Amino acid sequence: MSAPRRALVTGGSGDIGSAICRRLAGQGLEVVVHANSRLEKAEVVVQEIMAAGGKASAVAFDVSDGTASAGALQDVLADGPVQVVVNNAGIHDDAPLVGMSAEQWRRVIDVSLHGFYNVTQPLLMPMMRGRWGRVISISSIAGQMGNRGQANYAAAKAGLHGASKSLAIEMASRGITANVVAPGIIAGSMTEDVFDDSMVKQMVPAQRPGTPEEVAALVAFLASDDAGYISGQVIGINGAMA
């Protein structure tokens, strides 16, 4: 029996990240749950997965730090290749551009966009040797439409679109796909204090927020063998907002 495929999910302890981890583990993948610094939060997700009969481990490093990322990923790869990477780590630091500090601009882009490079690049050669891989990046409707006060966030996420489309072309002949999932308003800790029910009904034709589990279902499909001919795509999951 061959070893199960392995998946690394950055930002794996948050609402969407943990749902993705649980869904991938439920499909039989061995999941590496990433956290930025609070390893104990990733460990909680690991314990949930293991209690349900899955396989998982936890890792903590700052995706915006290239040296730290390379060292941590070297340790991860020592246990075998990672065939699925989900670039889910991201942060908000909102302000109108006229009042946005250089640190606010850089910090958001460092995590979402530079983090994509720092995490994905070291995993590609092992994927190429196995001639199978899935690179899935979590963007946002803000990266497609823009959003007031989020020029930094929208720029970082839109950057993922171009990077993923280019990577898809480079890797297409190697059995490796690269796609982007762009959620709209998703229920969870990051949105519950921002959007009330009336705002959601006004903004979302579906009249409700999405759920982390719905995002996870799309990611899990893109991570499967069935999605082998889908690559270079930005797929919205937003209740018909765009």
Image (tube, rainbow, N blue to C red):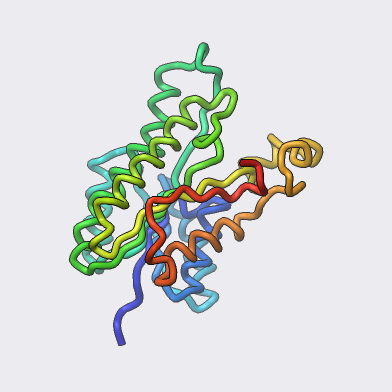
Q: Nearer the viewer, residue 100 or 131?
A: 131
At 23% from the left and 42% from the top, the residue drawn is: 67
Whole-percent x and y of residue 165? 35, 46
Q: Nearer the viewer, residue 163 or 199?
A: 163
Q: Quadrant of the C terminus?
A: top right
Whole-percent x and y of residue 144? 51, 36
Q: Quadrant of residue 7?
A: bottom left
Residue 10 makes an appearance in the image: no
At 57% from the left and 47% from the top, the residue drawn is: 183
Whole-percent x and y of residue 204? 71, 42
At 40% from the left and 71% from the top, the residue drawn is: 225
At 47% from the left and 54% from the top, the residue drawn is: 12
* 29 up-or-down from 204: above or below: below
In the rendered structure, the answer to whether residue 43 lies left or right of residue 19 reads left
Q: Nearer the viewer, residue 168 or 129?
A: 168
Query: Residue lying furthest top in this view?
Result: 98
Q: Quadrant of residue 148?
A: top right
In the rendered structure, the answer to whether residue 141 lies left or right of residue 77 reads right
Q: Quadrant of the N terminus?
A: bottom left
Whole-percent x and y of residue 69? 28, 46
Q: Nearer the viewer, residue 191 or 183?
A: 183
Residue 94 makes an appearance in the image: yes
